[in-house]
Amino acid sequence: MFVCDECAGGGELGVRRDGRRPAAGLVLGGLVLLLAASLLFGAAFGAVALRPDDLVRMTMNHLVGAGFTPTWRPQDEAIFFAIRLPRVLGAALVGAALASAGVLFQGLLRNPLADPYALGVSGGAALGGALGFLLSLSFSFLGFSPVPVLAFVGALVAMSLVYALARTGGRAPIVTLLLAGFAVSAIMGYAVSFLLILNDRLQLNLPRVYGWLLGGISVTQWSQLGLAVVMVGLAILGGWVLRHSLDALSLGEESAQHLGISVESDKRLVILLGSILTGAAVALGGLIGFVGLFAPHVTRVLVGPRHGLLLPAAALVGAAFLVLADLLARAILPPTEIPVGILTAFVGGPFFLWLLRRERREYRV
């Protein structure tokens, strides 16, 4: 198993040339401004262009009753609040959830290649979402259609199965978790392909299924966003509460136990929180790859390996990154919308490789 030197606290990632780290408040403040700018641009551009300054005044009028005289059309306000704003906020939420889950799983597994889908969550989510299309169900749960609901349930079921298979003698060894996650993800992934081949009636829905599997922000109601904000916010807060356990686990389970950490109980909590974050992201955006791998590594360059700062900073980086990726997905080939998962790979992949080359990080086996 690969162990990341900087995850174990031994690297210099995030340290300036003079040996000092940038102030935490300065970094977080800068990332908040980056996210705000990303949200503004994401909401301004689309099939109907909206002026960013008008969007700010609209928002101030609604939030605090600022009383700005409208210089925009009524339909512009309807487009912003009913379509654009829910979508860009949904993209930010999905990006924050995936980045935070990536931080949690990388810290738990001590593996720089770990992402939110490392423990079989993607396979379960894909199978659940495909069943939502196959069964042609028509129920609604808290504003969500069957596809995101079943995808969320599938993600949690897959994670529970992986943990149950890996657990032996009251423990769930890291290597066993990874192997069980790989096996479950592969089985469920091929189960999706098998279902698509068998079901002739799905032929008309195949583009929708593949589009969902490639990722795409699908927030259409404020009620969906509100529920997701609560789930993701509480899960990120729970991960931050476990920050000291994650720092200790990054040194190895034996070292963490010597430091007084309840290793197995904290591992279960990290897995649960990471699964909730991933399931919520899948429910809102389908299977979007690379964000959970890209954002934590980029953030470590800025803030170092300590999870108390790394987790919120990575959430902000992931949120801004996916908002901009979603904007590009809408803008590159109008009126066709490219699946955002393709953009996250095409944009994030080369940048990530450049970052690895520039930093010349080393990983020990």
Image (spheres, rainbow, N blue to C red):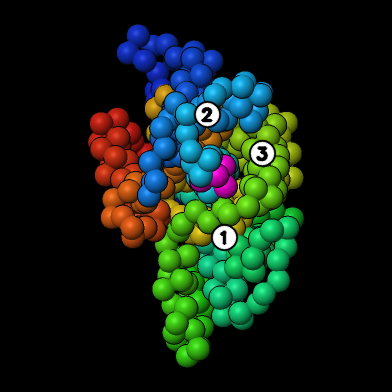
Pair 1/2: label in front: 2
Residue placed under numbered mark 1 in the picture = 121
Residue range in magenta is 78-82
Residue 350 horizontal/vertical position (percent): 27, 44
Q: Nearer the viewer, residue 12 or 273?
A: 273
Mark carried by residue 233: 3
At horizontal 53% and vertical 68% (from top left) the residue drawn is 126
Q: Distance of mark 1 from mark 3, alpha carbons?
A: 20 Å
Could you say whether the residue bearing mark 3 is in a helix, strand or loop? helix
Name the one closer to the observer, 287 or 33.
33
Residue picked out by circle 2: 70
One can see residue 95 in this view? no
Amino acid beneath label 3: Gly
From the viewer's perspective, is the residue at label 3 or at label 2 nearer?
A: 2
Amino acid on which disc 2 is placed: Pro
In the rendering, at what x and y percent does residue 50 appear?
A: 42, 37
Nearest to the observer: residue 4 or residue 336: 336
Q: Nearer the viewer, mark 1 or mark 3?
A: 3
